[in-house]
Amino acid sequence: MRVLIIKTEPLEEIILSLPVLDYLHKVFRGIEVDWLADYSCLEILSDHPLVSRTLGSSYGRWRSHPFVLKSWREAMSLKEIVRERAYDLVFDLEGTLLSGVVSHLSKCRRRYGLDATFVADQFNLRFNCNRVPLRRQDQHLTDRALRMASIPFGRDHADLEPCAEIPVQPDDEIAAKLFMATLSDGLVFVFHLGTGSATRLWHETGWIELGRELLSTFAAATILLSGNDGSGLAERVAQGIGRQTRFLPPMSLSGLAAILRKSDLVVAGDSVPLHLAAATMTPTVSFYRSTDARTRAPRGEMHRSIQSPLACSRCQLSSCAKDAQCRESIKAGDLADAAMAILLNQPQ
């Protein structure tokens, strides 16, 4: 059996959808699974042991410049590839007009997509044969993807406990060991200060207070700072916390996954490093402002999440006049308490 998964972007949602690969290989031995993603997101899929073939697309250009000749040529080339692969199943996890078109172009007879309640673009409904209704318990993005994948096989994903797998290159594993050997013998915390939209970030004072709070209990710990955007935030946070901070340089996703896997705790907003950490079985504390912890936060005993208490949180906006107020609504003490609960093995 050969299957195509269509989930092009963003990268953090692709990571949240990775358990589908594990599920499919558990329910059908010998299955071949192809994945269509934007070129910018292929790194995490190209060496994945459960992916037979990755298909790249310039999804961002298609969306913004649909009538450019280069977009049409790429679309026609992709059409030939998906038809040649002769898929038995297509899972459209994207739910957009473009993902629906690609699904239709495959000429696969069993094409699955979301129903009208959850689809991102209503035009998508014209292109998929089977529209999967989601249950009330399918709030999380991972559960939505697994729900769709489970329909043709009639096997509840909860029985199999599918998980994500992040491939790490041997050279990156060695580099991570060498880097970690340069740190003190205490615990290693990673603070991802964040890159991306302003409404997913926290504030400088909060990071400093959190760092000092954790070091007051774990005096030998090292705090690694990632997400340096060149604004000087990382330097100011490091200066505010003290000498037990180090900067993580830019690196590949494989390299970052290797570092996160060897860390004791990751604190971050809704971001790629957060979901990478969860996929590598590293404990996390995460905060949510414009996005929804109920649909995106890592789950399980070794994870804690905090949603902004403002009534307008979960707004999905990339900028907001209340940005400063929203950042300050996430309290350093709450994040510190969540971190302590994980590190001291306190039940939720």
Image (cartoon, rainbow, N blue to C red):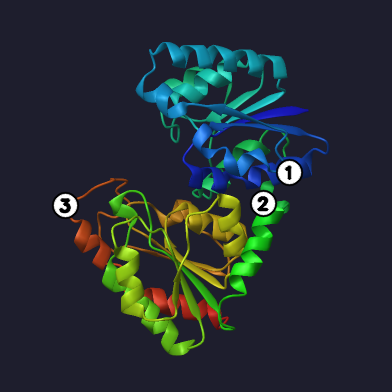
* Residue type, label 2: Glu
* Residue type, label 1: Pro
Residue underneath mark 1 = 49
Q: Earlier in the sequence, mark 3 or mark 2?
A: 2
The disc label shown at residue 321, or none: 3
Label 3 SS: loop
x, y (%) of residue 215? 43, 84
Give me the C-alpha separation between circle 3 and circle 1. 45 Å
Residue underneath mark 2 = 165
* Residue type, label 3: Ala
Examine the rendered structure and indicate whether residue 187 appears above or below residue 84. below
Give 108 or 320, whichever is nearer the viewer. Answer: 320
Residue displayed at 56% across by 68% down = 283
Residue displayed at 35% across by 24% down = 64
x, y (%) of residue 316? 32, 46
Give 113 or 200, whichever is nearer the viewer. Answer: 200
x, y (%) of residue 80? 63, 13
Q: Quadrant of residue 231?
A: bottom left
Label 1 SS: loop
Q: Earlier in the sequence, mark 2 or mark 1?
A: 1
Mark 3 in CB contact with mark 2 (< 8 angstroms): no
